[in-house]
Amino acid sequence: MDPTTATAMPEPAAATAPGHTTSTKGLLLQHEHGEHLSLRRYPASARTGRFVERYWSVHWDVRDQPVYEVQLIPHPCVNVSFMPGPGCEIYGVVSRSASRQLSGAGVVFGVKFRPGGFTAATGHTASALTDLAIPMRDVFGPAADDLTEAVLATPADTQRLQLVDSFLERVLPRSHDGAYDLTLRMISTMLDDRSITRVSHVAGHHNVSVRTVQRLFHRYVGVGPKWVIRRYRMHDAAELLSSGATDPADLAVRLGWFDQAHFARDFRFLVGMSPGEYASVCAAGIDHVARRTPRKS
């Protein structure tokens, strides 16, 4: 019997929202963005929360900057973005770091699906979307174009949120399968338990085979379970380095890398600089912001 099928035996369940299945980490060099960029997060409704982690928006004004780049360490989530120009696109999981150059002033409104939530809601295999973007209409039909027009014509996030959440309430299913539930439980384990450093740990914790974990992640998440474990550790590393941690060797041990060299190599590959360099840039930036900020009397 296919191991994935064996773990998916529970009958479809009612669409009630689980707890958090992603963090708020991942935005690099946050100290640089305070004057120019505002990232806002909004909860999903009870109906859409089964599949949607949250809604978000980014507002920016960089009219005094020739080039302004925002860099992220992405989550294992499918996102939907409403933005002038591209319109509305569905973005699969981004396997490397992600960056976007901003100009002028503007806003983008988005939907962050739970890991696996997009596949559970639409039936589209997540791995087929990894590192790709497709028009929303390709999945949700012509109604997506009407939604996009309405969202882009709306001046406030509260109205954008109502429009998008109401649309998803109408089109998302009212039940989900047991395999998706299992995938969410695995994701939560990886997110909350940093003693999990191997796929075999996840499999043992949930009483399934390693192959079952791999197949579920291929279908529902779009990247492998080993990738997700490493990504969450990298989120932790970037946050700790930006908060003043200056010993890469200690971080490597604390976060489960084999040694400092492996940690430094992985960090540089994703972020573009060594852990020490990133910590120095963050420290210098925070000090610069502090010197510019007037003290309250």
Image: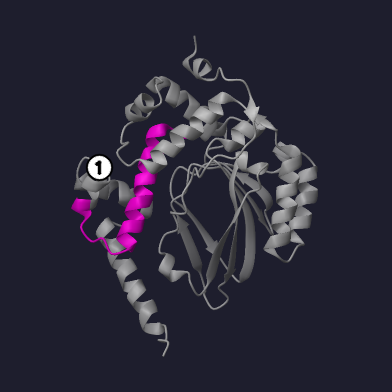
Give percent across and percent down for residue 107.
64, 64
Q: Quadrant of residue 42?
A: bottom right
Asked whether residue 272 appears in the rendered view, the answer is no
Give percent across and percent down for residue 215.
47, 24
Question: By what rule are the colours in the image chosen?
Answer: one colour
Neighbours of disc 1 within 10 Å: few (<14), some (14-19), many (20+): some
Give percent across and percent down for residue 286.
35, 73
Q: Is residue 247 magenta?
A: yes
| Residue topped by disc 1 | 257
Closest to the observer, 90 or 167: 167
Give percent across and percent down for residue 74.
47, 49
Instruction: Identify the residue shown where x is 41% and y is 26%.
Output: 206
The local secondary structure at tag 1 comes to loop
Q: Which residue range is magenta in the image?
A: 223-250
| Farthest-out residue, bottom | 297
Q: Is residue 105 magenta?
A: no
Asked whether residue 21 appears in the rendered view, the answer is yes
Instruction: Identify the residue shown where x is 31% and y is 32%.
Output: 198
Query: Quarter holding the C terminus?
Result: bottom left
Closest to the observer, 182 or 89: 182
Relative to residue 109, is residue 36 depicted above or below? below
Amino acid residing under circle 1: Trp
Relative to residue 80, is residue 200 depicted above or below? above
Relative to residue 8, is residue 274 depicted above or below? below
Closest to the observer, 19 or 240: 19
**Magenta span main SS:** helix
